[in-house]
Amino acid sequence: MFNPKTDRIKKIYQNQPKGVDQLMSIFSGKVNMYIDYANVRPWADTLGWHIDVRRLKQFINSFSCVDKINFYVGCLDGNTDSMKFIRDIKKYKYELRTKPVKIMKYSIDTTSVPLQSTVLINQFMRSALVRKLEVAEIENINRIFSNLNKRDIYYIEDRKCNFDVELGSDMIMNLKQNDISTYVLWSGDSDFADSVEQILNAGKKVILFATARKVATELNGLRSKGLFIFDIKKIKNYICWRKEIDAGLA
């Protein structure tokens, strides 16, 4: 079931077989993977290492039961790094789903905005948190905005590209086709809880690839229905950047 595609993978497996052996014990039948890269990429901040998509593909391909690796990522038009990344995903033969990243602009222009107003703050904080702020704290935040204005910064850009609908729809479509036994979701986002629950209720197996403290409560609650959460730290050396692999295994 596990046939290392490179000598490096074979070497790592000989030294650290535990994570792979666990996956072999829980994979069954035909396996599909769904990688929500917008949720996976920020894991680097928690893990202290980065996922190398070339090594990831080599590793996953070493499991003979994996049928498709669906990869969801936005493309920032005109951005050299983003365009190269998309080309790499195609080159490594993932099943790519992409669409343009939207650039959202939020005003922080304090002109005519009272110091005690939350009108600008409301764009960046949930209302439940804003209600907890003292007047002095609100004023301090608005002063920060004002200081940014003095540096000719009057709006904040944010990028948005959500694949919740596409990914969830793909999983349910595969469920209706009834040819997939194990669904592997790379995301801890609560938006997938409904799709995951439907798949579990249909008697299929769902494995969540995630990292500690990055799994939504709604998904954690599905453990009782059979959801298995696999900590990707167990396969770090197979899928991280070369310079971050443990000494002697690179």
Image (cartoon, rainbow, N blue to C red):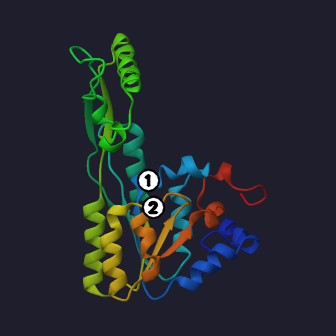
Determine whether the residue tagged by mark 2 lies in a helix, strand or loop: loop
Determine whether the residue tagged by mark 1 lies in a helix, strand or loop: helix
The mark found on residue 88 in the picture is 1
Query: Circle 2 sits on which residue?
Result: 92
Left or right relative to 167: residue 33: right
As drawn, the residue found furthest toward the top would be: 150
The image quadrant where one finds the N terminus is bottom right
Q: Amino acid at mark 1?
A: Asp
Residue depicted at x 28% and y 29%: 118
Q: CA distance from mark 1 to mark 2?
A: 6 Å
Q: Nearer the viewer, residue 110 or 61?
A: 110
As drawn, the residue found furthest toward the left would be: 112
Left or right relative to 138: residue 123: left
Residue 33 occupies quadrant: bottom left
Left or right relative to 172: residue 220: right
Residue depicted at x 74% and y 74%: 14
Q: Is residue 1 visible?
A: no
Q: Is residue 166 visible?
A: yes
Give percent across and percent down for residue 134.
Answer: 39, 29
Q: Nearer the viewer, residue 34 or 217?
A: 217
Label 2 near label 1: C-beta < 8 Å?
yes
Give percent across and percent down for residue 122.
Answer: 28, 35
Residue 188 versus residue 4 in the image, above or below: above
Give percent across and percent down for residue 220.
Answer: 46, 69
Q: Amino acid at mark 2?
A: Tyr
Residue 111 occupies quadrant: top left
